[in-house]
Image (tube, rainbow, N blue to C red):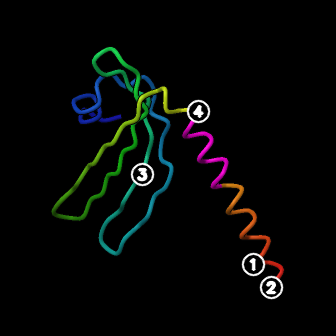
Amino acid sequence: MSIFDRIFMGKVIKDFGILEEKSLVIGKIKKSMLLAERRGKLKIAFKWSGYVPFGASVTYFDLSIESIPKLRQFITEAEELANQRAKILNQS
């Protein structure tokens, strides 16, 4: 958790850590998830951060905590579709 997380997202309750990390030739990109409280409401926040030797960028987007069931449904469906696709590709 960085000071920027606190400034832009509010009180960070939990930093779940890095979901995905990609090394570039001269830099790195990280995607992570946070649970934060901002203006009295809980939010799930996704954070993209990247850096190169002479620059950096951080982007956040958040969802209300009420979005968790729908997000879980979408992830479950995406996982099922990916598994079906993998089975089809393995049969070929």
The amino acid type, in three-letter code, at marker 3 is Lys
Q: Where is residue 65 drawn, in percent x and y?
A: 47, 26
Decide which of 53, 40 is in the foreground and name it: 40
Residue 77 is marked as none
Q: Is residue 54 magenta?
A: no
Image quarter in which the N terminus is found: top left
Foreground: disc 4 or disc 1: 4
Residue 92 is marked as 2
Foreground: disc 2 or disc 3: 2
Residue range in magenta is 70-78
Image quarter in which the C terminus is found: bottom right
Q: Where is residue 61 drawn, in percent x and y?
A: 33, 42
Earlier along the polypeptide chain: callout 4 or callout 2? 4
The amino acid type, in three-letter code, at marker 1 is Leu
Q: CA distance from mark 2 to mark 3?
A: 33 Å
Seen at 16% across and 63% down, the residue is: 54
Decide which of 13, 51 is in the foreground and name it: 13
Q: Where is residue 77 drawn, in percent x and y?
A: 66, 51
Residue 31 is marked as 3
Q: CA distance from mark 3 to mark 4?
A: 21 Å
Earlier along the polypeptide chain: callout 2 or callout 3? 3
Q: CA distance from mark 4 to mark 1?
A: 30 Å
Q: CA distance from mark 3 to mark 1?
A: 28 Å
